[in-house]
Structure formats: structure tokens, C-alpha cells
Amino acid sequence: MTNLQEKTQIKEAIEEYCRIKRLSRNELAIQIGVSSATLSNMCNDKWNSIDDKMWKKVWNYVKPKSVGVTLNTVDLQDIERMSEKARKYKLMLGLIGDTGMGKTVALESISRKENTFYLYFDNQRPKQFFYQLGKLLGYDFEGSVYDMISRACEVLNTLDSPLLMVDEAGKISDTILMHLHVLRDRTMQNCGIVLAGMPYFKMNLENRIKKQKIGMSEFYRRINLWHELKGLSRAEIDFICEQNGIAKADVKDFYRYKRFGDLSNEILLYKTINE
């Protein structure tokens, strides 16, 4: 059961999330997929009718996200820097890096900022994709794909320096890429976009261009900058190992793990074995 202290913490997290993102409770409720009455009851201490599953659902959305010691890596700092450059100069940025390099963790952390929207691509169809984007933007609307894109553009063009971040962009279908092409053209004077994916995201786009796939060259040209993550340096591995209590004599065994995800797994294994 969710206890009184936990409920108070969730209530405070809701209020803090709305403050940072400058959202109304109704807009946040749409994003989470709960009723506005539920959030209102949580914030007004009317807790008797709210079950534990609902508390957990809300908490998982509004709880603070931290990247911990990974903030000290050059790659994570680069993601922050390039994302803010995309926002400031209204750029469309391609961010590529292998799995386990911390793209998702960093983007989720950045998404806590005002007018910043993180959308994870999970093999949605176009209408599902733009419906989810609409929820992030604070409205619940479903119509034709054209109408859904138009609504998203309208909202993005009214916000102050919005940033849209799409994760797993390498998996996006050609159809949705063409829709993103339209969204980019209609918001490029006001909105920055980050498309993050595996290295094959860029390679596949280039291969489609060579095959004269309709629209691919035009879409590729709209990506103003590409940035590729490089992986952990020895100094960063030294720091992370030190933070995790790895004996200095054993640190050299971790130097081959350039991806943060791989390094984390090996540190966990090391700690389990050496308990």
C-alpha cells in the first residue's frame, strides 16, 4: 500500500513537474493518461478513492530523473550541449550512438525542462505517433494524419523555444519520416528537433538516397547537423569505477567497455562476485 509519506512525495512531485514544465494539471493528466480529477484529488489531499496502481502510474511519470555520475562523461555533456543548440538556433539535429551510450537516459533528463518534449518511437503507425505527440503537447485529439500534424505544428509554433526529441529514430518508417518532413517545414522558424538513434539511422538514410527513394534526399538535407557519440574515455572509466568502489588494481579490466551500459553491467557483475 502507498503510505502517507509516499503520497505526499508524489503530490509534491506533481506540483514540481507542473512548475518546471509550466503545465496545468489538465495538460499533465493528458500526458500521463489519467483524468484531471485524479490529479486534482491527489493535490488536494482527497486520497481515499485513489488506488495504489494509479499512484504508481503517476509517480513513474513525474518522479525526478537523474543521470547520476554519467553527467561527467563528455558524451552526456555533448547531448545536453547539442540539444540546447538545436533549441536556440531552431535546428534539426541527428544524434547517433551505439546502444548503451546513454542517449535515452540523457534525453529523458533533458525532457524535464520547460517546452521540451521527449517521444520514444515504438513502432507506432503514423496516427499513433502523432496522437502520442499531441498528448505530450497537452491535448487529446485524433483525426486524419494531416489534421494531427497541423494541430501539433500550431501548438509548437505558439511555444517559446520548444524542443522536440525523438528517440529510436533509426526505426522510423519512411512514411513517418515524410510526415516529420512536413512538421519540420512548418515549425522550423520556432522549434528545434533532435532525432536520436543508432549509427545505422544515418547510414540507412544515405542508402535510401542512393536508391533514389522519394523524399529521402529532401529529408536528409533538412538535418542541419549530425553528432556521433564516441564512448567512454579511460579517465571517465576511472571516475565511474571509483564512484562504484572498484579496487584500483582491477580498474584496468574495465577499460575495454566503452559503452556506459556495458560498463554498468560489468560493474554489477563485479560487485556480485566480490560481495
Image (cartoon, rainbow, N blue to C red):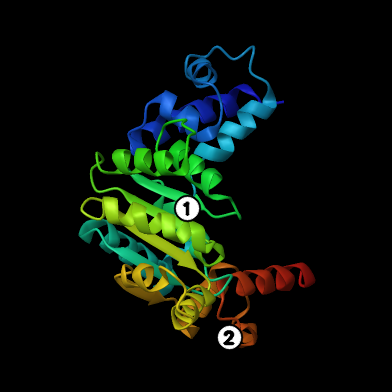
Which secondary structure lies at badge 2?
loop
Judge depth for marks 1 and 2 and give the one in front: 1
**Residue at 39%, 32% in the rendered image:** 18
Mark 1 Cα shell of 10 Å, populated few (<14), some (14-19), many (≥20):
many
Image marks 1 and 2: residues in contact by CB distance under 8 Å: no
Amino acid bearing label 1: Glu
Amino acid bearing label 2: Tyr
The image quarter in which residue 91 lies: bottom left
> Could you tell me residue 136's position as x and y percent?
44, 40
Quadrant where the C terminus is found in the figure: bottom right
The mark that comes first in sequence, 1 or 2, is 1
Q: Nearer the viewer, residue 145 or 255?
A: 145
Q: Is residue 88 left or right of residue 10?
A: left
Q: Which mark is residue 108?
A: 1
Q: Which mark is residue 255?
A: 2
> Could you tell me residue 162's position as x and y percent?
29, 48
Q: Nearer the viewer, residue 80 or 227?
A: 227
Q: CA distance from mark 1 to mark 2?
A: 27 Å
**Residue at 51%, 42% in the rendered image:** 132
Inspect this view and state whether residue 257 appears: yes
Which secondary structure lies at badge 1?
helix
